[in-house]
Amino acid sequence: MFQPFKEYLEEQIFNRFDLQSRPIPAGLESNISDRGKNRATIQSWCYQCPELRKIRYTYIDAGETAQVFNSVMYPSHNYDIPLLGIDFLSFGKKKILVVLDFQPLFRDRFYQEKYIEPMGEIRDKYNELAQNLEMKFYDANQYFSKYLLFAKTDADTVVNRLFPAYQEYIQLYWETLENAQPLTNPDDIQRIVKAQQDYDQYSAERDPAHGLFSSYFGSEWSEKFLYEFLFESASPLAVANTR
Ligand code: BLA
């Protein structure tokens, strides 16, 4: 279902950046589940380049039952630009949930104006993908922009609307990165380190995927996958009492 999205992302990053592989902890790069009646595979890829300190993406293929494409781009710490967040999920072809956003690190007006407002023009072309759905796990006011695409949709819309929207958001993201002025002041850089770390902590604690991963691969593997790969700057101890 989302294979063309993965291929587009790969074609883009391979041609645009001087990529280096970024190691994925042993045992977390892939897994296969034979639990229950449905076979599921999960596979992840991770790269870095001077502009992006972590580019990760994951594909879950459980045939008709579930297809998931998830990705986050973390800019290098000397850029204050948003993270690019992608979460496309299809369950049994009937339930399709798509989320795509420039995930803001800060919420002040200056930041909004600089990095979020430029998304508005694209967002306005894809009204059917911006449905103002209520968030149950996350807080829409934290790490999400007002121009996120967030929709429950169908397979035709994924092909005909989400794919072009995805390409436009990604192109704008590359432009944003190209135009970004690298920070040089250590205090400014430290502020980005902290903000990206907070994002990981928040995301690891809220991620609704924990249940999905656990059902296929067990809770021990899931916990490791969340804290040692997806959101590796998060500390599991900080949430020991909340799960
Ligand atoms: C929702 N994301 C979900 C759900 C799952 C995942 C299972 C719940 C779907 C449901 O309602 O049944 C799955 N999340 C994953 C997977 C990974 C993951 C497979 O991190 C990792 C491989 N989520 C992101 C990113 C964004 C994001 C980068 O990981 C930003 C674009 C958004 N996912 C997001 C949102 C929801 C969601 C906004 C709805 C959650 C809510 O209602 O609060």
Image (cartoon, rainbow, N blue to C red):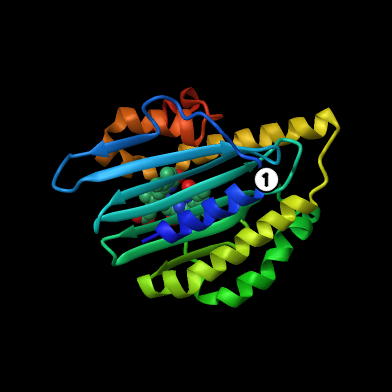
Q: Residue lying furthest front in this view? A: 15
**Up-down: is 36 above or below 98?**
above
Q: Is residue 86 left or right of residue 29?
A: right
- Would you say residue 155 is visible in this rendering? yes
Q: Count how many numbered circles sit on residues in the image.
A: 1
Which x, y percent locates residue 136?
43, 54
**Residue 212 found in image quarter:** top left
- Taking the image as shown, residue 94 lies to the left or right of residue 157, namely left
**Residue lying furthest left:** 37
Residue 237, image x and y in percent?
Answer: 47, 22
Q: Amino acid at mark 1?
A: Leu
Q: Residues within 10 Å of mark 1 (few under 14, many from 20)?
A: many
Task: Return the x and y of residue 118 as percentages of the image width and height.
Answer: 73, 64
Q: Provide the residue designation for mark 1.
A: 105
Above or below 151: residue 194:
above
Instruction: Give the SS element for disc 1.
Output: loop
Q: Position of residue 151 (x, y in %)?
A: 46, 66
- Residue drawn at x 43%, y 57% as measured from the top left: 88
Residue at 35% in and 47% down: 60
- The answer as to whether callout 1 falls within 8 Å of ligand 1 is no
Please name whichever residue, 21 or 242, is drawn nearer the observer in this view of the structure.
21
Which quarter of the rendering shows the N terminus?
A: bottom left
**Residue 135 seen anywhere in this rendered image of the structure:** no
Q: Is residue 77 left or right of residue 11?
A: right
- The residue at 46%/42% (across/down) is 206
State the quadrant of the C terminus: top left
Question: Residue at the location (61% across, 66% down)?
Answer: 168
Q: Is residue 7 above or below residue 95?
A: above
Q: Toward which corner of the image does residue 90 lie, by quadrant?
A: bottom left
